[in-house]
Image: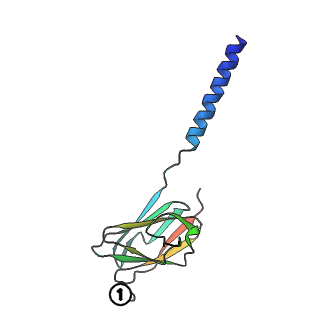
Amino acid sequence: MLKDTSLGGLLFILVILTGCSVFSKVDTPTRVHDIYINGQDSITPLELYAAVGEEIRWHNQLAVPIHLGLLGVKPIEEARCDKGFKTWFGTIRDIIPISAGDFVSVCFLHARPVRYNVWTDITDPFHSMSPTAIIHLDEAG
C-alpha cells in the first residue's frame, strides 16, 4: 500500500512539474497598436499611449510611398520585433520608408516619449511634413 501511495505521489508531482514547465514557455501575444497614415495631416491617432514591449505599427494607406522619421531614438538596443527599422548594422534608422499600402512596426524597450513626423514627399521635406505625433511609452503593468 505504501509503495502504491509513493508511486502515485511521485507521478502526481511529475505531472504538475511537467505541466508548469510547458505552460510557462508559452508567450502571451504582444499587444499591437495601429497608427494609420492617410495623408500629411491625417495620422490616426496623433497621440498614442502604449506599454513597453507592445508593438507599434504604422500603416501607409496612401497610394504613394512615405517616410517616417523618429526623433531622438537611440540604437536598436532600445527596440525589438521590428519590421523595416533595422539597418544592416543593427541600428534603428532615423528615416524609415513605408511603401504604399504597407506597414512598418517596432516594439520599444524603454519607457519614454517617442516623437515622430511623416513626410509624404521626401524631396520636399519642408512642405510635406506632418505635425509631430507622439507615443507615450509606460512601463508594462
* Residue 129 lies in quadrant: bottom left
Residue extending farthest top = 1
Q: Residues within 10 Å of mark 1 (few under 14, many from 20)?
A: few
Question: Which residue is denoted by mark 1 in the rendering?
Answer: 123
Q: Who is closer to the viewer here, 62 or 79?
A: 79
Q: Residue at x 40, y 80 (%)?
A: 130
Q: Residue at x 55, y 79 (%)?
A: 72
**Horizontal and vertical percent position of residue 1:** 70, 10
Is 73 left or right of 43, judged from the image as shown? right
Q: Amino acid at mark 1?
A: Thr
Q: Residue at x 60, y 37 (%)?
A: 20
**Horizontal and vertical percent position of residue 109:** 57, 64
Is 43 left or right of 91, judged from the image as shown? left
**Up-down: is 22 above or below 2?**
below
Residue extending farthest front = 88
* Residue 69 lies in quadrant: bottom left
User: How many marks are shown on the rendered structure?
Assistant: 1
Task: Report helix, strand or loop for mark 1.
Answer: loop
**Up-down: is 79 above or below 20?**
below
**Horizontal and vertical percent position of residue 141:** 59, 56
**Horizontal and vertical percent position of residue 7:** 67, 19
**Colour pattern:** rainbow
* Residue 76 lies in quadrant: bottom right
Residue extending farthest left = 63
